[in-house]
């Protein structure tokens, strides 16, 4: 699993990020002034899937017959990247948002899954969608398309900074995806973002329970000083109960 100094995605941090929703993580990134972290236009191929992992990048360029003849066949950049992906990594594919051809199919999905990849994210299409869905690896895509990549794409290069769904992604960036979409987290602040998102989820859950009990949102969402004091008192009481338990 990729836990190099440049990508400090430890098992503990992975667990934290897995427990936090993408919406909550995105709110904390926004508080840090980071807005360009959303991979737009992609959806999970299978509902309910979530992933956390570090980016391994792949770039396609627009199709041109003479260049495809030299770069499209054999053990090209696409196949090399799927063969090299490591456990816990996310294959992130730049396809320029072009949905008119697939960027992977079932064989490559099987290869990524066998290598232990955490997910595949592409702002292009996916073919063999039923077979890919059955593989079990989370795949987030712009949509299905039956055509092979040579209709629109040339597999060009890998392991570099790319643009996927309008977001810049660098190798080693941390990606998290769920039903709300996919975000990119700079590795250096991932722990802070995860901790803040988990704390906010706890607070939001408490607020939701008060609203469900009949309280109006005025003064509660966001909390004013009175509600904040009640929340902190309730939180302290619950902590005391946990500590007192045998």
Image (spheres, helix red, strand yellow):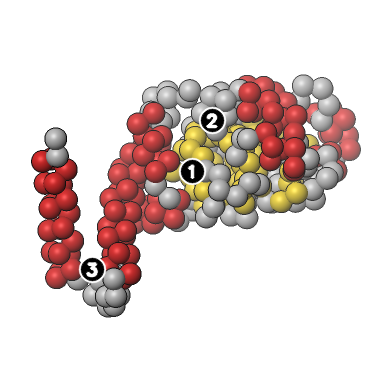
Verify CB contact (< 8 Å) between mark 3 and mark 2.
Answer: no
Q: Is residue 72 above or below residue 139?
A: above
**Distance of label 2 from label 1 (alpha carbons):** 11 Å
Q: Position of residue 102 (x, y in %)?
A: 77, 43
- Which residue does the image show at 58% across and 36% down from the upper left? 119
Q: Position of residue 12 (x, y in %)?
A: 35, 31
> Which of 42 and 7 lies nearest the eye of the viewer?
42
Q: Which residue is mark 3?
A: 223
> Which of 55 and 115 lies nearest the eye of the viewer?
115
- Which residue does the image show at 64% across and 28% down from the upper left? 112
Q: Residue 174 vs residue 119: left or right?
A: left
**Distance of label 3 from label 1 (alpha carbons):** 28 Å
Q: Position of residue 166 (x, y in %)?
A: 59, 52
Q: Which residue is mark 2?
A: 89
- Which residue does the image show at 75% across and 49% down from the upper left? 144
Earlier residue among tags 3 and 2: 2
**Distance of label 3 from label 2 (alpha carbons):** 39 Å
Tell me if residue 167 can be seen.
Answer: no
Task: Give the label on residue 176, or none.
Answer: 1
Q: Quick one: label 3, few (<14), some, or many (20+) residues within 10 Å?
A: some
Secondary element type, mark 3: loop
- Which residue does the image show at 77% across and 21% down from the upper left? 75
Q: Position of residue 174 (x, y in %)?
A: 46, 38
Residue that protrudes farthest toward the front in the picture = 246
């Amino acid at each position: 699993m990729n836990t190099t100094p440049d990508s400090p995605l430890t098992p503990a941090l992975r667990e934290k990020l897995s427990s936090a929703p993408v919406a909550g993580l995105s709110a904390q990134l926004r508080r840090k002034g980071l807005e360009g972290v959303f991979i737009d236009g992609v959806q999970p191929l299978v509902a309910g899937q979530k992933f956390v992992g570090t980016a391994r990048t792949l770039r396609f360029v627009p199709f041109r017959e003479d260049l495809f003849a030299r770069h499209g066949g054999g053990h090209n950049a696409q196949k090399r990247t799927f063969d090299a992906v490591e456990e816990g990594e996310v294959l992130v594919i730049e396809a320029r948002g072009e949905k008119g051809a697939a960027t992977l199919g079932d064989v490559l999905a099987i290869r990524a899954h066998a290598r232990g990849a955490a997910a595949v994210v592409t702002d292009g299409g996916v073919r063999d969608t039923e077979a890919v869905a059955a593989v079990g690896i989370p795949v987030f895509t712009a949509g299905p398309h039956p055509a092979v990549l040579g209709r629109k794409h040339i597999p060009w290069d890998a392991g570099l900074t790319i643009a996927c769904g309008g977001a810049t992604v660098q190798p080693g960036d941390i990606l998290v995806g769920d039903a709300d979409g996919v975000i990119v987290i700079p590795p250096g602040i991932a722990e802070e973002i995860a901790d803040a998102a988990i704390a906010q989820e706890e607070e939001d859950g408490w607020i939701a329970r008060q609203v469900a009990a009949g309280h109006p949102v005025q003064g509660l969402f966001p909390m004013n000083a009175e509600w904040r004091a009640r929340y902190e008192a309730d939180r302290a009481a619950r902590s005391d109960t946990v500590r007192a338990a045998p």
